[in-house]
Amino acid sequence: MDNMDLQVLRQVQQWHDADHRVVLGTITRTWGSAPRPVGSIVAVRSDGMIAGSVSGGCIEDDLVARIREGALTLKAPELIRYGVGAEAAQRFGLPCGGTLELMLEPVGAGSSIAALLERLSRGERVLRTLDLTTGVVTLTEPPAHSRDGADRLVLSGTRMVTHHGPQWRLLIIGAGQMSQYLAQMALALDYQVQVCDPRDDYPWTLLAAPLTRDMPDDVVQRLDPDGHTAIVALTHDPKLDDLALMEALRSPAFYVGAIGSRVNQAKRRARLKEHFDLSDAQLDRLHGPVGLHIGARTPPEIALAILAHMTAERYGVQVSSSAVPTGGAEAGCVV
């Protein structure tokens, strides 16, 4: 669930608390080209107010029209489909003949929206199971290490199961200024963020990204990285970074990066190979200098470059951080 959908749930709860009738729509399947992924949500109030989006706007307009006409006085969840055929696809803003399937559910006391929001506020991951006959929702905890983003929605003839809460994790080694920007941006992208820095002279104020003063390699081991985990080292201190990077590069983490110039990256690779017996294949997984080369100079720009590269890796887009700058020092890599 991204932050846009979390905002929709908060709006749904506010409307429900104010005794408005609300219908919540969840994308269950798409064919062809669809504007938003499966699991995305939209909410429509009885007077036509809308929160969220599942298309370029045309489907939302149709839902509002249906509600104003009284056609969506639902007693139980109902599945509808948009965009069948080229003409309908064009009408509903689905390019390339796309088709979109939407589960509509009337929001009531059994929808458990407030309980879901409470658990999400604590950073938990939650399975929301909707009974398609009664509309009643149950909330459970996903199995440990169940982080398959492709399995965020399961629809059967009797129920719909959706995954909520952070699907991706980020460990930042170092609590400096750049880490503050990286953590804030990652939280906005729905990462579960943890920061590690054993140095007491680096304060940390971002409560949504908890800080531990334990040694970074111990934190990586405890984190038990999986394919939805990113680890970024930002301390410039080999005593802190190298052991943690060793553990990270031996794990299934989808992204491992370290700040530093190309000269220092070459020295780091040599240390990791000589002292920790990492293979060339493992070392090739290290993104250093970390992030895309976009000409970034300031801490927020560098944080943006790092998250842009992480996003590309998540979606399998082939980009590289190895472009040689045309002039000047690389951002954040002068030592």
Image (tube, helix red, strand yellow):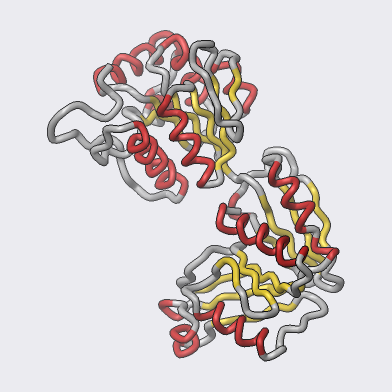
How many numbered markers are drawn? 0
| Quadrant of image for the N terminus | bottom right
Q: In the rendered view, does 40 fall on the left or right side of 130?
A: left
In this rendered view, identify the residue nearer to me: 280 or 69.
Answer: 69
| 135 is higher (above) or lower (below) than 223 | below
User: Which residue appears farthest toward the left when viewing the image?
Assistant: 327
In this rendered view, identify the residue nearer to me: 275 or 121.
Answer: 121
Q: Position of residue 27 (x, y in %)?
A: 61, 69
Q: In the rendered view, does 202 fall on the left or right side of 119?
A: left
| 48 is higher (above) or lower (below) than 202 | below
Quadrant of res 290: top left
Q: Residue at x 51, y 25 (%)?
A: 248
| 88 is higher (above) or lower (below) than 264 | below
User: Which residue appears farthest toward the front when viewing the image?
Assistant: 18
| Quadrant of image for the C terminus | top left
Q: Position of residue 280 (x, y in %)?
A: 37, 24
Q: Residue at x 85, y 73 (%)?
A: 133
Q: Residue at x 26, y 41 (%)?
A: 294
Q: Position of residue 58 (x, y in %)?
A: 50, 80
Q: Residue at x 28, y 23 (%)?
A: 333
